[in-house]
Amino acid sequence: EVQIVESGGGSVQAGGSLRLSCVVSGFTERDYGFGIVIGWFRQAPGKEREGISCISTYDKSTNYADSVKGRFTISSGNAKNTVYLQMNSLEPEDTAVYYCAATYGTQQVVELSELEFDYWGQGTQVTVSS
């Protein structure tokens, strides 16, 4: 069973930084050989879920939404089942629940759409105050 656990959320003032972590368990080495993409989404109150970034565990290629490009950086840790989202220059508009998600069977990054991802974490709250 694939499980995803996010951590690192919290409250910060505008201009500050946070680093989110995502640990994915349950995939086999064979799954990683075929390719796994891990992504981050967020959902603000009253808004639709927005895809913000993803990374291929196969070749480390990345994809970003325009709204976070240049401010957020996705990376994988020494353990390929761990992915980080470094968020800098945070703005009140970044306030949302942040979700980590995963899909397998692809060695390249995918479109930042919910439909591309099969497994989801429970989310972690990020609050940015002005």
Image: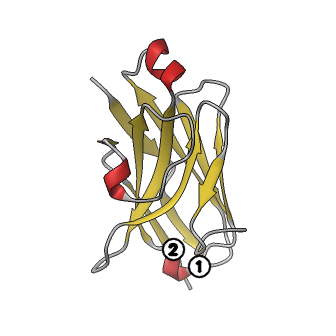
Residue denoted by label 1: 91
Q: Which mark is residue 94?
A: 2
Res. 4 image quadrant: top left
On the image, the x and y values in percent for residue 104 come to: 42, 32
On screen, 130 above or below 41?
A: below
Q: Amino acid at mark 2?
A: Asp
Left or right: residue 115 versus residue 24 is: left
Tell me the distance, in whole angstroms, between the alpha carbons under discs 1 and 2.
5 Å
Tag 1 secondary structure: loop
Q: Residue at x 43, y 44 (%)?
A: 6
Left or right: residue 123 versus residue 1 is: right
Left or right: residue 126 versus residue 130 is: left
Label 1 packing within 10 angstroms: few (<14), some (14-19), many (20+): some
User: Where's the C terminus, which quadrant?
Assistant: bottom right
User: Where's the N terminus, which quadrant?
Assistant: top left
Comparing 58 with 45, the one in front is 58
Comparing 44 with 53, the one in front is 53
Q: Residue at x 51, y 49 (%)?
A: 8
Res. 77 image quadrant: top right
Check if mark 1's residue and mark 2's residue have beta carbons within 8 Å: yes
